[in-house]
Image (spheres, rainbow, N blue to C red):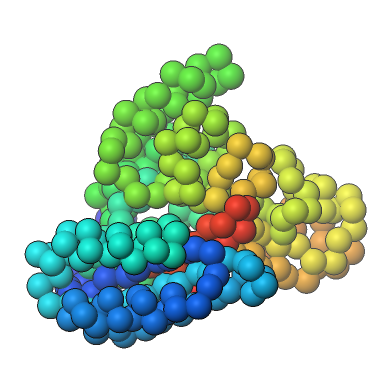
Amino acid sequence: MEIHIKKDLPPAAGQYPNRARMLISCPDGPGIVAAVSQFLYQHGANIVQSDQYTMDPAGGMFFMRVEFDLEDLNTKLPQLEESFREVADQFRMEWNIYHAARKKRLAIFVSKEDHCLVELLWQWQAGDLDADIALVVSNHLDMKEYVESFGIPYHHIPVTADTKPQAEQRQLDVIGDDIDVIILARYMQIISPTFIDHYRNRIINIHHSFLPAFVGGKPYAQAYNRGVKIIGATAHYVTEELDGGPIIEQDVQRVSHRDDVNELKRIGRTIERVVLARAVKWHVEDRILVHNNKTVVFS
């Protein structure tokens, strides 16, 4: 059996132990950027990157992502957050500050198809995915030996129509309280509203179609029957609406009448793995803000 050992590479965020990221969304108006910048300056922080976007400038929403360095961040961050509430209240902000050096903990759900899972494990092993893969959950045993060769716990939790509530409770139990995001890496089960509510905007799914086309099951067969000339994949946050959550990333590739369903699937697997990996990377780097059923993704 081939053994996979994660290289002990310094993570990108770990190179900057005093770096934080601030994400802000609020009604648009004058003075927001100045207020945030002045606040950080007054508290001794140095802004290293700042991005803004206004959705519908005529009375719309404002979104902002700021990276900054602050000496002795671990000690000062609680007071910084408390002090920022006055600014946030003034502009009716929804906001969060994240310590960049703290790696997010991931739980990956998978069924039988391995390509998306393998891509995430490869990127994690290479140090390109700056996160901790805490565990893998599956309703099948197919990936158990492979995942455990990375030293990652594998939890086999079978799911049937009759046992779905009990299975989801077992999943919540093994995940615990310290998982930041759940990744459905071709996990072929519908997630219940109760489960979704525990992890709102923290469950990322890969759908093997360029949404909103061909929602639901067997999208490649749907695409083939429709005679499409482009196929794609979509990474999105999971909501109660099947395949209808906020879209994070999409990509496509041209196909032709010569490509049957199996060839569409083969081509699609490459698109799926790349699109999902991008979405996960952006999430763990705090680059995504969700507003209604849309996302703002800062580069």
Q: Position of residue 266 (x, y in %)?
A: 67, 59
Left or right of 114, for residue 34: left
In this picture, is 179 found above or below 298?
A: above
Given residues 102 and 84, the one toward you in this image is 84
Left or right of 130, for residue 198: right
Q: Can the viewer see residue 283?
A: no
Given residues 244 and 30, the one toward you in this image is 30
User: Image point 44% across, 59% down: which residue?
Assistant: 92
Given residues 264 and 25, the one toward you in this image is 25
Given residues 106 and 263, the one toward you in this image is 106
Please state the total of marks drawn on the protein image.
Answer: 0
Left or right of 52, for residue 260: right
Left or right of 138, for residue 208: right
User: Image point 56% across, 57% down: which residue?
Assistant: 291
Q: Position of residue 20 (x, y in %)?
A: 27, 71
The image quarter containing residue 8 is bottom left
User: Image point 32% across, 37% down: which residue?
Assistant: 175
Q: Can the viewer see residue 285?
A: yes
In this picture, is 136 found above or below 268?
A: above
Q: Position of residue 14 (x, y in %)?
A: 21, 72
Q: Position of residue 110 (x, y in %)?
A: 48, 42
User: Image point 39% across, 64% down: which residue?
Assistant: 90
